[in-house]
Amino acid sequence: STSICGPVSHVIVNELSGEIVTTSGVLLNVWTLNGQLLVSKNTSGMLDSLDDITALTISHREDYEEHLKLYITGHQSGHIRVWRTASY
């Protein structure tokens, strides 16, 4: 099943991994280049279930032996949230 709740509002290709990152409403999705869903994150909290994602960017960081992928989302409420995945 796909993880889309309404129209896709942002698409970014991670240049280092080839992953495709999309947003749809409050959902942040990470896909393989072949279209397989890797991660689907509902970014809303209990009190802000309608706080749609309005901006998206990706950042990378090396920290010791860990490579961090940071996904930064901006929201309709004005909040900025940072999500991370790690690969070793």
Image (cartoon, rainbow, N blue to C red):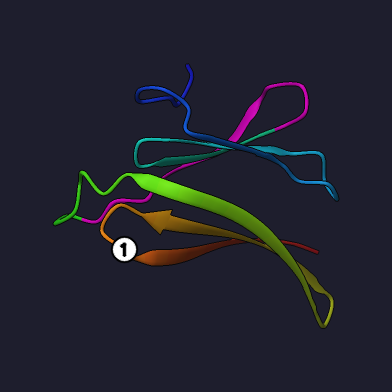
Crowd band around label 1 with a 10 angstrom C-alpha radius: few (<14), some (14–19), many (20+): few
Q: Is residue 15 magenta?
A: no
| 10 w.r.t. 48: above or below | above
Camera-side residue of 49 and 1: 49
Q: Is residue 35 magenta?
A: yes
| 71 w.r.t. 65: above or below | above
Instruction: Look at mark 1 in the image and give the residue it sits on.
Output: 78
The location of residue 32, given as percent across then percent down, is 73, 31
Residue at 43 percent of width and 65 percent of height? 81
| Quarter assignment of residue 10 | top right
Q: Secondary structure at mark 1?
A: loop
Residue 43 visible within the image: yes
Residues rendered magenta in the picture = 32-45
Quadrant into which the C terminus falls: bottom right
| 50 w.r.t. 87: above or below | above
Residue at 47 percent of width and 27 percent of height? 8
| 35 w.r.t. 71: above or below | above
The location of residue 22, given as percent across then percent down, is 56, 36
Residue at 61 percent of width and 55 percent of height? 57
